[in-house]
Image (cartoon, rainbow, N blue to C red):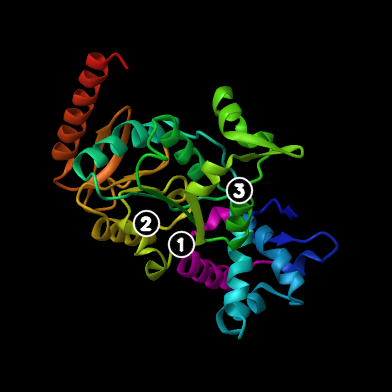
Amino acid sequence: MTQNNSGGAGRLRGYHSELFALADAPFSLLRELIMEKTGMYFDDAKRGLLADKLSELVAVNGLTSFLDYYYLLRHDENADAHLNALMNRLSVPETYFWRQSEQILAMSEVIAPTHFATKPRAPLRVWSAACCTGEEPVSLAIALAEVGLLDAQPIEIVGTDGSPAMVARARANSFGPRSFRQIPANLKERYFEPDGDRWRPIERIRRAVSYDVANLAVPAEFAGLATADVIFCRNVFIYFADDVIRRVARTFCERMPDDGCVFLGAAESLTRLNVDLELAEIGKAFAYVKAGRRHHIERTNSAILATRTATHVTTGH
């Protein structure tokens, strides 16, 4: 695929550029439709990028213009299948194990012990809302195994993505070298086994995670998942329109428990979007919690950690 210098059109190799020119009208129509269906927003500066991403879909469907592709997405009897193909094409499979590890450790070393101390009979539910190819939920399972909770307590870890192709790759549980560029070597040795020239998580880690397709642009698809105690929704809002982010964040706030929390990516923030979530310090990380709950959550976490520390000192563990 190539992108022309103007940023206003894309073309597929072997096809005339005018055939795949993304003019103003189809660009506006497709941008609004993609935002509606996927949450992703392509501003004017990304017109060429969008043209490059969609050119192949235009060609493989035997179409002659982006406008034809818009009508295919909007009106074709197989529109759902075309939307899945679009989600697969727009997905950004850039992830790795132990990414932003301070958040992962805050979940396993602070939130999980606090949860089981205050709700001993309730399962801890952790949702990876944009799991891509699975590295994030597997990292969460490993972190819980490291603190001795994965097998000892009821824990539910669910990974979802809007792209069926990404979810299929996550379920395959087969990872190449790039996925391991940040995880400590001892964790790789302990929790992975060879899989040809790749690696797969050991059975107890694989068994701990389930996967499904859920589109964050469609509240009905994730409202049930948003009742999780911990939500990891990292590095997805950077691609979303503000109105979509507000809608997703408000659904999180409405559905998650009072002591629930949401972790976002390092470049993401909700502070300017007027949602009822505020930042709380958890361990060495920050997470969003329901407005008015920050002090209670921080005090509870501190009290539980102090108790655990004193117990470990007393028992010599």
The answer to the question of whether label 2 and label 1 lie on touching residues, with beta carbons closer than 8 A, is: yes
Sequence-wise, the earlier of marks 3 and 2 is 3
> Is 9 in the magenta?
no
Say if residue 252 shows up in the picture.
yes
| Type of amino acid at the residue the image marks with label 3 | Pro
| Type of amino acid at the residue the image marks with label 1 | Gly
Say if residue 70 shows up in the picture.
no
Image coordinates of residue 5 in percent, x first then y, are 69, 50
Query: Magenta residues, as a range?
Result: 21-46
Residue at the disc numbered 3: 93
Image coordinates of residue 71 in percent, x first then y, are 60, 81
236 left or right, relative to 49: left
| Type of amino acid at the residue the image marks with label 2 | Ile
Pair 3/2: label in front: 3
Magenta-drawn stretch, dominant element (helix, strand or loop)? helix
Distance Cα–Cα, label 3 vs label 1: 17 Å
Residue at the disc numbered 1: 39
Sequence-wise, the earlier of marks 2 and 1 is 1
Name the disc covering residue 27, or none: none
